[in-house]
Every structure is written in C-alpha cells, then in structure tokens.
Amino acid sequence: MHNLNPNEPSGPIENRWEKHLFDLSLIAPQNRKKYNIIVIGTGLAGASLCATLGEAGYNVKSFCYNDSPRRAHSIAAQGGINASKNYQNDGDSTWRLFYDTIKGGDFRARESNVYRLAQLSCNIIDQAVSQGVPFAREYSGYLANRSFGGTQVSRTFYARGQTGQQLLLGAYSAMSKEITSGRVIHQSRSEMLELIIVNDRARGIVVRDLVSGEISAHIADCVVMCTGGYSNAYYLSTNAKGCNTSATWRAYKKGAYFANPSFTQIHPTCVPPTGDNQSKLTLMSESLRNDGRIWAPKNIEDCDKDPNNINEEDRDYFLERMYPAFANLVPRDIASRALKGICDEGRGIGSKVNNQRLGVYLDFSSVIEKIGIEKVKEKYGNLFDMYESITGENPYQVPMKIYPAPHYTMGGLWVDYNLMTTINGLFATGEANFSDHGANRLGASALMQGLADGYFIAPKTVANYLAKSQFEEISNIHPEVVASLESVKARIGKLMNAPKPKHSPDYFHQKLGRILWSTCGMSREKEELKSAMKDISELESEFWQSIKVTGSESDFNQTLEKAGRVADFIELGYLMCRDASEREESCGAHARLEYLAESGDAKRDDENYSYVAAWECQEGLPVLHKEQLHFEFIKPSGGYFVVAKIDGKHFEMAGIDANKEINPNALLNERPDVQFTRWLTTEVGVSPIPMSPFYTPENRYLANNYIRFAYCKDDETLKESIDRLQKSFITH
C-alpha cells in the first residue's frame, strides 16, 4: 500500500509554487543528455512536454497511436482557454480564477494545485502568442477575450472555434523542432500495452506497432503519461474515436492508484445522436450558449413541427424558466440534466433513437435580429458552417439541435503536487491525471491544465526526480522486461483465441456504453449502480468467452486494437460505478439522486466526503484509499449566489410600482429589480445584484422581480448584512 502523501508545500498559497521551485533539485545542462525520458501521448500536454524537455537537453522518446502527433484529440477543442490576464479590467485575478475553479469543482480539488494552475495561466498565453497562435484580437491589436460558461469575468482567449487546433499546432511546431534536432525521437502508430517496473520504479514500456504488429520494449529513466481521458467508455462521446484508457489502465494494474473515476463531465451542447449505428458525437462550442436561447416545445404534439412554425407562446425556454439567475449559462451539469429531463418528458425534438427524441433547440433568431447576421458570422461563423456540414441544416435559418454527451473526465491516475503517481518515476499530466478541477470543470480550463503541466510543471518536477535518483543499466533481457513482453503476448493471444468467438468489440462497447450512460451518467442511484456492477461483471465474462477478433496479431489489425481497449473500458466501467456508489453525496458532475435538492442542486457532505477517492488494484475487488482535502484559504460553502424573489409587499415597501407596463427598450434604471436594488443599497446598506441586466431587452421581463445576493463573503460581512436586512424589514 502506498502512503497518499500529496507533497503539498506549506506557507502562503501565493508563494508555494515559487518556493517549491527553489527547493527542487536541478540538473546542469551538460548532464541532461545522460537521462532518457519516455512520453506517451502527443496532445497538448504531451507535445508541450516533449518540446520543453527537448529544448532543455534531455533525450526524449515520444509515442502516439495516431499517424501524426498533430492528430491528437486536443485539436478538437473549440471554445477557448482561460487565463487571468484581466485585460478588460473587470476584476479578474489569479485569486479569482483560483476561487472560481475551486468553487466550480465543488470543493473536491487540492487548493495548492489549483492555485498553481491559476498562477501559470498567464504564462500559457504568453507562450502561445510567442509561438504565433492566432488568438482573436481587438481592433487596436490587443488580445480579445470573453466570458465562458456563466463566468462573470472575461478570461477566455479563443481563436474562432479553433483554439485547441491552434494551440496544438503551436506545441507541435516546437516539438517538431526538437525532433529535427534529434533530442526527441518520435514513434507514431504505436500503442502502449504494458508498463515496465524494475525495483519499484517505472523504467519503460511495451508498445505494439499498429502497422506491423511488432511488440517491443523501450527503456528509460522515467515515464510520463499524457494520454488523455476515458469518456469513450460510454461508447458515444465527444472524444475522438481512438481515445482510450489502456495506457493509464496498464499503470493502474501495475500499482498506480486511480482517483475519482466517477467524476465525468456531461457537456450540454453536442449534436444529438441520430441512430444506433453512430459511433461518435460532435461537440459544439459552449460559447454558443452566450447568445443562443435553449427551448423545447411546450406541447408534445408540436415536437414534429418545423420549429419556425411553433409560436412563441408554445415554446418553453426551460433554462430561463428554471434558473433565472444564469438562464442559458447555468453550469454544464445542471444544464445537461435539465435537457435530459425535458426529453424524458417526451418533449424532445429530432430523430428518434430507441423510440425517444434526444434533442432540444439552440436558437439564434433573437441575436440575429438584434445585431445582424454578419456580426453573428464574425463570432460563430465557422461553428455554424461545421454544424451545417454535419446536419445539413442552416443554423442561421433553423435552430440548432443539441443534446448532452460525455465529454471530459476529471478522474484519472492519482498524482501528488509533483505530478508523480503512486509508482516512483511514473508521472501523469493533463487529463490523464485526476486533475486540478475537482468534481466539475470550468469551461475552457482543460487546455489550460494540459499546457501548464507540459510547459511549466512536469519539466521541473521530472528533473527533480531524475536528479535525486540513481538508475541501474537495464537491457531487454532483464527479467522484468521479458515478463512484461510475455504478459502482452499472452493478453493478445487471449483476445485472438476466445473459446466461442461470436461478437465484435463494438458489440460489447455499445452494451457497456448503455449501462454506464443510464446508471453512471448524468444521474446515479445506489441500487442502479449495484445492478450496473453486476451487469458489467457479466458482460466481462461474456466478452472473454465470445469476443471475435479476425485477422492476425502480426499485422495491421484495428479489430484487435479495439478489443484490447474495450476490455480495459469494461474493467474501468466497473470501477466508475463502484466509485459512484461509494460516494454518498452529490458534488459537481457526480449527481446521486438521493442527495439532490428539489432545485437540482448538489447536496455535498463535506464532513464525510471531502476526500480524493484513490483506488488500488488488487486481486478481487479494488481497494479504496482516501486523501483528505484541507481547505485553508477557501472554506467549503454553497454556490456563489442566492437568488431572491421580490414580491409585491417588498416593492410597495420601497415605493416601486412593479405592475406598470415597461417598454423592452426602456433604460435599465427604469426596471423594478434595478430600482429595488438601488433602494436596498441607499436605504438599507446592502447591495444585491439586479437580474435584468443579464438578459436581452426583449427578455428582461423574466427578471423583473429577481435579485441575487453574493454570499462568497466572510462570515462577519454576511452577519452584518443579515442584521441590516432584518432591522430594515422589521422597521417597515
């Protein structure tokens, strides 16, 4: 058993990373060429790490299963990347990004790691700009940024729906320079199938050449996993089809703990599924929710109608109705559950899948009418073009169709502050580790973590490990290397020679996906999770009995590739359900139905479940270890705001006529909620936030009698506010 020591530095949080850097051991430039490092995966984390290590002078071996590093899944990220530059002087800061991330993750992340991520975010933008990444710019030439996913500050930098692609090309170009120099040796079309451990240290990997079928061992002084997430366990997800968990799962089977596997994020703005034969879902950027209005027909009989023929009064803008504070920009998990609920009621739209319509509308007609079609094209043109090419529908004329889909995984290999797993010499970066996000990820923060790990963190912590270690020479005839090679060959042989071969890998993958989606997706429930674990165990037995792999293991064989990955997904699926059943609370993207408020908000149990769940692989059932989370700087609390409804009595008290008809184009200061806010501020000494400024003019009536109070304040401030409100209303 490994002692779960996160190795967090102590002292003021703003100085921890700087102090830690000073305490890390260094390797002189002339000595770096003595060390060999293996990097698996070439997404943002992997490519940036290879580039940085190569530039520093280390010998790097890089592996990916694609035909080129530039085909990594990172290229599909559209929306943007966060950084606390505060260009628009709207109050952003390192502290606020840290605060938003901790709160957004529902207090299930380490403070030290998150603060470091917020600190390094600005460095990432500088690095990308120096590489020529074409971020959007204002007319004056300054970098442009915007809010994302309900955030109240503009901190998301973007490149016209191609942010991930452009950032990856920047990292890949830097990596290519090092490949040319010879300091990075890259091997494409190679899949890691085993981790080699010698004397309790990670010393290499076994890979299969996906073209020739050749199995080979590669030795190094340490290994870094940059292999992404595992949302393809659900079969249908927004991830590239090849994304898998096999590399991290091999590490788990060799002793690396797997943390928070049930923390999976469901993204609300995806193109809906269209049939049983579909193998991939397409993500539409969350930035679309800034201007698009989400609705469904009020009447089931209207679901077949052309949306343009459905009258306004027959449309249910359900997010605006259910969550007036954030409306269409509610957090991803809440939006996704609301969308699913509408479809479960029978009010979904689009094609029927398993006799159910799985879609709602994302409508841009209001914003087109307001600012014109050309301005909308400037903001979203390429996204609209992509949608039209996929669906054959013009979103300028017909509302988009969206539905939730598995997207990002906050779980992954457990790592300490140095990004080292529970195996010495094995590091995990980006989405491959259990992340800096907690139980839910802020929109546009995925790219931020991958690049922070690759450019600025792992190069320093890997060097520290190498400097403090001594390594024996290992050859391919070492017993552990030979055993690892034989283990891979035996597993492949088992896949190729099932007793009763009958079903394809996709057959089993689809069955697993349906189990996970219905029981460990947007909502979970104890008994259903128990049933799911039983079903997955039976599916695993059936898999090894009847998996049918055609072709040869000594050749290009995609069926064999898939079979190996599905076998790992099945085992992981069991662990996901096990983890979800153990956590008797709701937090972030983990929504246990037994622990949800009527509003759909999570009921956290900070006293009993404020920990990272780290699972150890053992014969029989996995064993749970807990890393307790301690919050020194941000105390666990509820959400950012509480929304209060102003009734007629309150308006009367403030001398406001809330019943008079208001022109939609009237000045904001004429609106009842704004007037009431002014009265509370001047007469009572408590300043809430009026809600109508957050709505377009034609929809401000929705917020006429709503205000919100920020309760992310210290206890003394909150108490003083309560006292003032009580005295005022008692007086009146």
Image: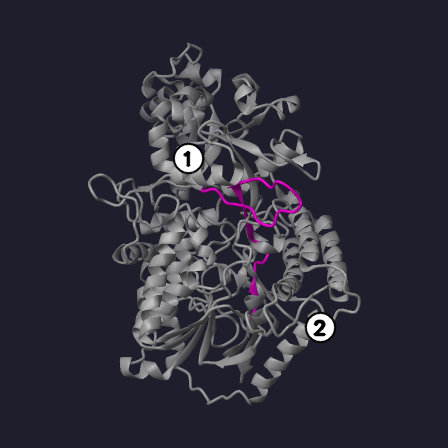
At horizontal 50% and vertical 59% (from top left) the residue drawn is 629
Total numbered labels: 2
What kind of residue is marked 2? Lys
- Residue 32 visible at all: yes
The type of residue carrying mark 1 is: Asn
**Label 2: element kind:** helix
Point out residue 51 in the picture as x, y percentages from the top left corner. Answer: 34, 68
Give the label on residue 290, or none. Answer: 1
**Nearest the camera: 723 or 202?**
202
Q: Give the magenta part as a residue range.
A: 256-285
Callout 2: few (<14), some (14-19), or many (20+) C-alpha neighbours within 10 Å?
A: some
Give the answer, above or below, for where 327 lies relative to 256: above
Magenta includes 277? yes
Q: Position of residue 544 (x, y in %)?
A: 74, 66
Say which residue label 2 marks.
494
In this rendering, position of residue 454 left or right of residue 568: left
Residue 496 place in picture, x, y as percent: 70, 70
Q: Residue furthest top?
A: 660
Q: Main secondary structure of the magenta part?
A: loop
Question: Which quadrant is the C terminus positioned in?
Answer: top left
